Image: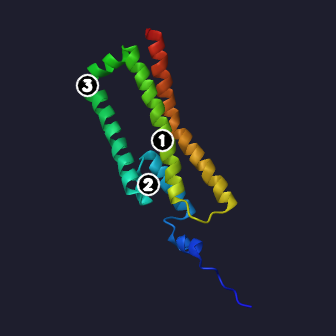
Amino acid sequence: MTDSVDAGPRRASLRPVNDDLTTFNGAILWTLLGTIFPGLGLLRARRWVTGAIALLGFLGVVGGLGYVLLKDRASVAHIVNQPELLILTATVCGMFAVIMVGIVLATYLALRPRTVTVGERVLGSFVVLVLAFGACAPLALGAELAFAMAVHLG
């Protein structure tokens, strides 16, 4: 009796187990880095287009906000006195929160090794949950403050 492995079409389509991009610990580390700098972990996972869009979008938003807050204070004063713009700000914060959860989850799933133990799966889920919460909490606070200010103004 010989031990042979069926090399059918299903077997041929799977990538080898040693083709993983990172270890489990590396996936956690790169997911953390990808949460701090959205898109960085996706670039590590060789998701070039998605990672570049996320990273450039993040840098553009941070740069734009930095410019407005440091150089164009008249725009900030105009926004905080217009209820419609405050509601728009709250909506944009909510949209960014959803996008951030997607980026954190996609980064972890793209970097996670093919074979993980049950404990690693549970730990990875917990880490992704904590990172997603950490990314969304400031956005949720900003949305709440903008909406409360809009209601207060009229």
Q: Which residue is mark 2?
A: 42
Q: Secondary structure at mark 1?
A: helix
The percent coordinates of residue 36 (x first, y second) are 44, 46
| Circle count | 3
Cα separation, mark 3 vs mark 2, equals 33 Å
Among the two numbered marks 1 and 2 on one chain, the one whose residue lies closer to the N terminus: 2
Cα separation, mark 1 vs mark 2, equals 13 Å
| Label 3, residues with CA under 10 Å away: few <14, some 14-19, many ≥20 | few
Question: Looking at the image, which residue is at 25% across and 25% down?
Answer: 72
Q: Which residue is mark 1?
A: 100
Question: Looking at the image, which residue is at 58% across and 65% down?
Answer: 114
| Residue mark closest to the camera, 3 vs 1 | 1
Please state which amino acid type lies under the numbered disc 1: Met
Which corner quadrant holds the C terminus?
top left
Q: Are marks 1 and 2 in contact (CB under 8 Å)?
A: no
Q: Which residue is mark 3?
A: 72
Looking at the image, residue 135 lies above or below residue 45: above
| Label 1, residues with CA under 10 Å away: few <14, some 14-19, many ≥20 | many
Question: Looking at the image, which residue is at 29% across and 28% down?
Answer: 68
Q: Secondary structure at mark 3?
A: loop
| Label 2, residues with CA under 10 Å away: few <14, some 14-19, many ≥20 | many
Looking at the image, residue 1 lies above or below residue 7: below
Among the two numbered marks 3 and 1 on one chain, the one whose residue lies closer to the N terminus: 3
The percent coordinates of residue 100 (x first, y second) are 48, 41
Residue farthest along the front direction in this orientation: 9
108 left or right, relative to 116: left
Please state which amino acid type lies under the numbered disc 2: Leu
Please state which amino acid type lies under the numbered disc 3: Asp
